Amino acid sequence: MKITQKEHKESIEDDKLKAIVLQVSEYYNMPIKLIMSKTRKRHIRDKRQLCHHIAVKLTSLSLASIGYLCGKLDHATVRNSCAIIDALITTDKKFRSDYSKILKQCRTEVSIVNLKEVKSKNKGFRLLRGNILKACRVSDDSQTLKDNIVYILLSKSAGNLSQSL
């Protein structure tokens, strides 16, 4: 059974959404199942809405797709979630701080999913996921992160080059 390019892209986007939900659940120390439940309790609902907002920002999934993957919700629910989170970001300093930390972590995880996609497209290109994860966790800012990843990639390609010589 051959996977079409569209199905492959959808599975990559699904992986990005899973990474986002995982980061939110780890940050707030809350089970994924609870975040994705249908409960209306505010402290749980806010985390679910945060997942929706970050997914809209970092993935190319439609609102309907995000809603469906997050508990068979419709697009209007996801759109409303984004509006609520935007309002919270502008009014609540603590939430804004939490949001920026989570967004940074999610961007890192989504980048790793993107790197996996590059690896799957080009079989000869090998990335050391563990080293890149370490670089992401050690880095304080985006420039340091880029420098660390470039160093890892260059050292890996130099190692392959010296082996081939």
Image (tube, grey):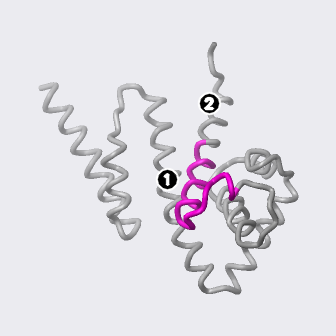
Relative to 131, is 111 on the left or the right?
Answer: right
Relative to 69, is 15 on the left or the right?
Answer: left
Circle 1 — which element?
helix
The answer to whether residue 94 is above or below residue 64 is: below
Residue 29 magenta: yes
> Can you tell which mark lies on residue 48?
none
User: Which residue is rendered at x = 39% and y = 69% of the image?
Assistant: 141
User: Which residue is rendered at x = 21% and y = 44% of the image?
Assistant: 155
Sequence-first disc among 2 and 1: 2
Provide residue 16's location: percent of width, then percent of height.
Answer: 59, 47
User: Which residue is rendered at x = 49% and y = 62% of the image?
Assistant: 105
Residue 127: name its quadrant. top left
Relative to 30, is 129 on the left or the right?
Answer: left
Provide residue 43's location: percent of width, then percent of height.
Answer: 71, 72
The answer to whether residue 141 is above or below residue 159 is: below
Residue topped by disc 2:
8
Relative to 61, is 31 on the left or the right?
Answer: left
Residue situated in front as seen by the camera: 85 or 160 = 85
Magenta span of residues: 15-35
Residue 13 magenta: no
Spatial CA distance of label 2 from label 1 is: 18 Å
Residue topped by disc 1:
109
Residue 95: name its quadrant. bottom right
User: Which residue is rendered at x = 19% and y = 39% of the image?
Assistant: 158
Residue situated in front as seen by the camera: 25 or 151 = 25
Provide residue 41's location: percent of width, then percent of height.
Answer: 78, 69
Residue situated in front as seen by the camera: 124 or 26 = 26
Residue situated in front as seen by the camera: 129 or 33 = 33
Type of amino acid at the residue the image marks with label 2: His
Please name which of the two marks, 2 or 1, marks the residue nearer to the observer: 1
Are the residues flagged by discs 2 and 1 in contact, CB closer than 8 Å?
Answer: no
The answer to whether residue 139 is above or below residue 133 is: below
